[in-house]
Image: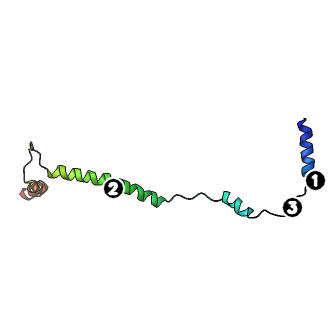
Amino acid sequence: MNVVDLEKKLIQVARQDKPSNNVPYAFEKRIMTFLRPLPTPDCWGLWAGALWRAAVPCLLLMMVLTVWSVVPSSNSSYSTNVPQEMDNTVLAAIDQVAEQPE
């Protein structure tokens, strides 16, 4: 069959069929479901989820560092009076200023 003749016959039949004014039931609702906007991502929810997932590794790291700082090592060359040494180090500059003659 010739494609050109078939096309002419189909166009002729389509022109004879008058369009109706009747719209199928719920046609606009079916069309609007396809046109529905995409849901916007919840930025605060994503941020909160990331923070909750990061909380567990942070707590584990805190516990490991706490245990590491509390448990004394056997070959430690540090003195046992760390707070006193810290005070001496911080206040050393003040002591030097006080000892200088004016």
Q: Is residue 4 left or right of residue 62?
A: right
Compare marks 2 and 3 and give the one earlier in the sequence: 3
Quadrant holding the N terminus: top right
The amino acid sitting under disc 2 is Ala
Q: Are marks 1 and 3 in contact (CB under 8 Å)?
A: no
Nearest the eye: 65 or 56: 56
Image coords of residue 54 (percent x, y)? 35, 53
Image coords of residue 66 (percent x, y)? 20, 53
According to the picture, the residue beneath numbered tag 2 turns out to be 55
According to the picture, the residue beneath numbered tag 1 turns out to be 16
According to the picture, the residue beneath numbered tag 3 turns out to be 20
Q: Is residue 101 visible?
A: no
Residue at point 6% right, 57% down? Answer: 99
Residue at point 62% right, 59% down? Answer: 37
Compare marks 1 and 2 and give the one earlier in the sequence: 1
Image coords of residue 59 (percent x, y)? 28, 55
The amino acid sitting under disc 3 is Ser
Q: Considering the numbered disc 3 on the image, is that residue within a helix, a strand or a loop?
A: loop
Residue at point 23% right, 50% down? Answer: 64
Nearest the eye: 76 or 20: 20
Total numbered circles: 3
* Disc 3 residue crowd, few under 14, some 14–19, many 20+, Cα 10 Å: few
